[in-house]
Every structure is written in C-alpha cells, then in structure tokens.
Amino acid sequence: MNIRRGLLSTISAITLFLVLAAFAIVLVAENGVVQRYRILGTARDMQAWLWTRSSNIGTFFNYRVENKRLVAENLALRQQLARYQAAGRALDSVAVRVEPDFSYLSANIVKQTVNRQRNHLILDRGRKDGIEPGLGVVTARGVVGIVGAVGEHYAYVISILGAGQTVSVKLAGSGAFGPMIWPGTRPDHMLLREIPVHIQAAPGDTVLTSGFSTLYPPDIPVGSVVSAQVSQGSSQELTVALFEDFRTLHSVYVVRNNHQAEIEALYEQVP
Amino acid sequence: MSRSRSILFFVMVFLIQLAISNFLNLGPWITISLIPFLILQIPLQRTPHVVMLSAFGLGLLLDWLSAGVLGLNAFAALMAAAPRRLLYRLIINGERKDVLWIPLLRDTGLPKYLNYLLSLTAIYLAAFILLDCVSVRPFGFILVKFVASTLVSSLLGLLLAYAFQRRS
C-alpha cells in the first residue's frame, strides 16, 4: 500500500513538474522576444529532426516497392538515353548544339499530407541546394506540385492534390489538351476538363503533361483515362487515374526550366 | 523562531530580492538571486508538490513585480525546487522528523549548509542564465556570469542564514 502511494506521489510530482515547466516556457516564449525566437527555433529543429527520422523509418519499410519502381524508371531512362544518343550523333554531323530545356534535382519527402483539401509536402532540399519558390516537382510517373516556400535545408511544396491547383495535360493519342484539377475526393483520381466533344477518349488512354506551362517538362505520363462524360454540352470531362500513388511516394525530382527567365522576359515585353 | 516570525522573515527577504531586481543595476555580469535561499526556507517536511508550487508562485510573483520576462524566474525556481529533497539527502542527510523543520546553519555546520545553498543556487542560476542568455551571448560570458552570480548570491544567502539563525 505504502509503495503504491509512494509511486503515485512520485508520478504526480513529475507530472506537476512537467506541467509547471511547460507553462513557464510558454510564458517566457510569449513575453520575451529573444526567448520566443530561440524556443520556436529549437521546436522547429526538433520537428524537422522528427520528420526526417519518421520519414527514414517509412522509407526503410518501403524499400522493396521503391526499388521496383527505381528499376523500372532506370530502364525507361536508359531507353530514353539511347534514343537521345542516337539523335545526338545525327545532330553532331550537322553541328547543331543541343542544350537541355530542364534540369533536375532529386529530393526526398520528409513529410506530406494527402487527406486534406489543400495538401503539401516537405522536401529535404532547400535554398542551399538551389531550390527556389515556383519550381515544379515531378516523378517519373507524374506531376507532384510546385515549390511554395524555401528554407535553408527544406522546401515546402504545394501538392497538385489541392483545391485550385491545375496542371496542363494532353491526351497521348489526339494531343487534345486541357487543365487537370483535383476534385478533392480521392488522392489517386483527377479530372481533365475542356476536352472538345469530338475528341474520342477511351478508357485506358494515357494522359501526359502538355509542356505548355514553364513548370513541368512535356510528355511525362501522368495517368490514364477511366471514364468520360459530357460537361455543359460543349466539352468532355475525363476522370483520370493517376499513375503516381501519393501515399507511397518518397522521392521526387525538382525541375528547373532553363529558359524560364527568357520566357518571362517575353511576357514583360507585351504591353 | 515562531511561525509568524518565519513568515515575516520570508516576506522581508522577498522584498529585498524585489529591491535588488528593480533598483540595483549591477550590469550584465551578475544576477543576484535570493530565491534559492527562500526555497531553502520552505520547511523540509513539505511535499515536493507544495515546494514546487510555492517556488513557481514565488518566481512568477517576482517576474510580475520586477517587470522582467514573465516566467523566467518561475522556470528557474521550479528547476531548483524539484531536486531540493534529493540534494538535502545527498549533502546534509539529516534525520529530522519535526513537522516543520527548516535546516539551520548551526544544525548542519557551515560546509554542509554552504554546499547545500551553493548547489540550489547553481541550479537556479544555470536555468535562469541559460534561458536568458544562451545563443545571444558568447559561452565565455555565460560561464563568467554564472560563476560570479552563483558566488555572490550564495554569499548573500549565507549572510541571511546567519541573520535568520540569530533570530531563532
């Protein structure tokens, strides 16, 4: 009985200590400017540390799936490289200089949401890696989002799974393009709008990025058509099943359009 | 010393602390605190809950009345109050069973009392100075401030302990 009472007393004393200490720290953070920044800075560092660790654990358990995906991606890239090498050899013969339109930087996801109306991701790359707000984020199997804010070591990405986010895409067969939006229901389906009614779109047709925005490179396979229905009598609305599963996503590529400044300068010249 | 005189002495020391905090400007190098001495004046048989709550309230009151950063003294006082019983057992190791006993200099002897007071003051000032200065001031400055403040505050506490003993 005495041991039990002693144990309860110790536990209640420790609880009281923790509650009072937390209260004092909140008071200090509220009332001291320097202390507030220091306490919030420490809290953010701890948060980032926790995110990184929990992400590492998640990545460890998904290695098998991730490996399969990387092998498939590698294969596709090798085939693409072979095609470009052949094209390069042909171009060399007529002395044409080929400069890539986009450059890529790989990044790991340390935190992400998929079940909110506006979703986001945190990447383990930041300003020190050359990341800037406004860059696109993609994978080999689709579009992920746009860099919204950048810290020294981390970047905040606005996911395409968000109300108001659109991606310009096209149908692989016909080339008909339109904006693709997220209806906010399932993280693996989006809607492709403004496709003219005369365009034949069958279930299984591949949807690719159009390349009409400066954010994403063209021809990235994004998903496949599931169903089509006429919307407002003048256009079709296609339901697209995304290739990328956001719930198992761990690594992405941040894309920089090497000609973005030039394109923006053109817009500025127009009165 | 009677209970009412003990309380009067306690209040008096708190008022001295208030005067030090509000009117005595010793520059950035020294922080004088009598709160650890006041934590020693809480009778030993009080439970840790009472000691922690009293110390926290005392610190908060000082923060409020001295227009400092609210919570700074309260946090430091809590850090010093929490291990008080453990420190008493480690340093003095007395077996007093009186209901409301306050350790006196003549009962414990100067070395043990000074050790006890220095330990509590060091914990208090470490918490206070770290929360107040860390990452804003260089480590050397923090160390010098900590050592100087601990020595001065403990010496002042010792003088008050003599005064308290004479009145007992």
Image: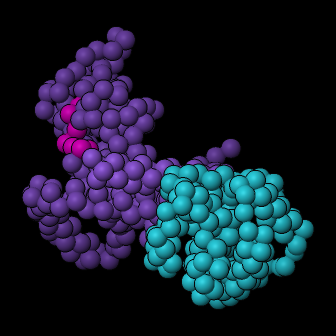
Chain colours: A purple, B cyan
Residue at 30 percent across and 62 percent down: it is: A53
Residue B70 x/y as whole percent: 71, 55
In the picture as drawn, the residue positioned furthest to the right comes out as B23
In the picture shown, does residue A230 fall above or below B45?
Answer: above
Residue at 84 percent across and 69 percent down: it is: B20
Q: Front-most of B114 and A99?
A: B114
Q: Specify whether residue A105 is in view.
A: yes
Residue at 62 percent across and 66 percent down: it is: B102
Instruction: Confirm whether the magenta stretch covers residue A97.
Output: no
In the picture shown, does residue A249 fall above or below A129?
Answer: above
Q: Front-most of A4 and A32?
A: A4
Residue at 29 percent across and 57 percent down: it is: A54
Residue A15 x/y as whole percent: 44, 50
Label count reads 0
Q: Front-most of A88 and A141?
A: A141
In the picture as drawn, the residue positioned furthest to the top comes out as A233
Q: Split into 4 quadrants, where in the image is the C terminus of chain A? A: top right
Residue A88 x/y as whole percent: 24, 72
Residue B4 x/y as whole percent: 76, 53
In the picture shown, does residue A85 fall above or below A16?
Answer: below
Q: Quarter-wise, where is residue B13 in the image?
A: bottom right
Q: Quarter-wise, where is residue B112 in the image?
A: bottom right
Q: Which residues are magenta?
A: A240-247
**A102 left or right of A186 in image:** right
Q: Front-most of A210 and B93?
A: B93
Q: Specify whether residue B132 is in view.
A: no
**B21 left or right of A132 in image:** right
Q: Quarter-wise, where is residue A32 in the image?
A: bottom right
